[in-house]
Image (cartoon, grey):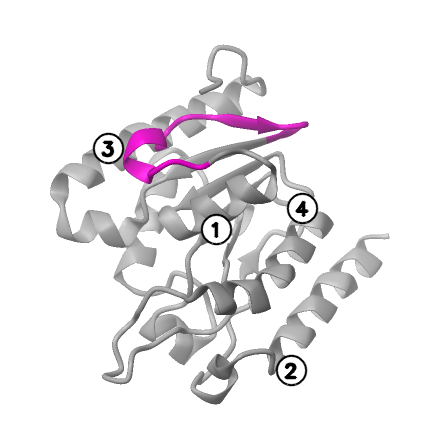
Amino acid sequence: MIVGFVKELDEISAAIAACRRCELANTRSKVVPGEGSHRAEVIFIGEAPGREEDAQGRPFVGRAGKLLDRLLAEIGIGRSEVFIGNVLKCRPASSEGKDRKPTEREVSACSHFLDSQIEKIKPKVICTLGDTATQYVLQKYGIKPDGISKIHGRVFKAGNLKIIPLYHPAAALYTYRLERVMREDFKKLKSILDQRTLEGFVG
C-alpha cells in the first residue's frame, strides 16, 4: 500500500517535470515539485521557487529556507517529518532575472499539482507561508482570505483540516520584527500539534 502511495506522488512529480502549461517551462532550470514525508501531518506551502530552488530543484534551500529549518528545529520538528512545497513548481522571474510574484494565469496553470499532492498526503495541518499561498489555500477551501498581517498565526478549519497562515520566511530576512513574530507563531503550531486538538485555537 505504501509503495503504491509513494508511486502516486512520484507520478505527480513526473507530470510536473513534463509540464508545459505555461511559459515558465521555457525559463526554468529545474522544476521544484516539493519534498518531505509522504505521510506528513503538516504541509508547508510557499509561493514559488526562487533562484536557489530553481538551480537545485528543491524547495526552500536559500536563505529563507535556512530560516524555515531553524524555526522548525526550535520546535523540535525535523524537515524530513513535514512536506514542503509551493503553489508554483517553477520559478517566476522578471526580464531582469529577479524573482517576481506569480501571475493569476501561472497559478491557475500550476496549482492543480499542489491540489493533487494535498489529496494524496492528506495532512492534518497546512501552514501557508506568505500572502500568495494563504490566498490560494483559503479560497480553495471556501474561506474568505485576508491579508497575512491580519491573520498570521490564526487557525482556520476546513472539515478535519486545519490551516495556519504564517509570514513567509523571506519577509523576516528583511524585517527582524517579523522573525520574532514567526517564532511566536511556530510556538503556537507546536502547542497545537502537541495537544492534537485545536479547541481554543480557532481564529
Q: What's the residue at 73%, 51% (across, down)?
A: 120
- Neighbour tally class for label 1: few under 14, some 14-19, many 20 plus, Cα within 10 Å: many
Point out which mark residue 169 bears. Answer: none
Q: Do the residues labelled 4 and 3 touch (CB within 8 Å)?
A: no
Please tell me whether mark 1 sits on a helix, a strand or a loop: strand
Mark closer to the chain start, 2 or 4: 2
Q: Distance between the residues labelled 4 and 1?
A: 16 Å
Mark closer to the chain start, 3 or 1: 1
- Region rendered in magenta: 145-161
The residue under label 3 is 181
Please tell me whether mark 2 sits on a helix, a strand or a loop: helix
User: Farthest residue in the right direction?
Assistant: 1
Q: Are marks 4 and 1 in contact (CB under 8 Å)?
A: no
Q: What residue type is labelled 2?
A: Ala
Q: Where is residue 160 in the image (x, y as percent from the top left)?
A: 67, 27
Check the picture and name the quadrant holding the C terminus. top left
The residue under label 1 is 45
Mark closer to the chain start, 4 or 3: 4
Whether residue 155 sits left or right of residue 196 in the image: it is left
Whether residue 202 sits left or right of residue 196 in the image: it is left
- Neighbour tally class for label 4: few under 14, some 14-19, many 20 plus, Cα within 10 Å: some
The residue under label 4 is 39
Q: Distance between the residues labelled 4 and 3?
A: 28 Å
Please tell me whether mark 4 sits on a helix, a strand or a loop: loop
The residue under label 2 is 18
Q: What residue type is labelled 4?
A: Arg
Between 196 and 178, the one lying in front of the other is: 178
Please tell me whether mark 3 sits on a helix, a strand or a loop: helix
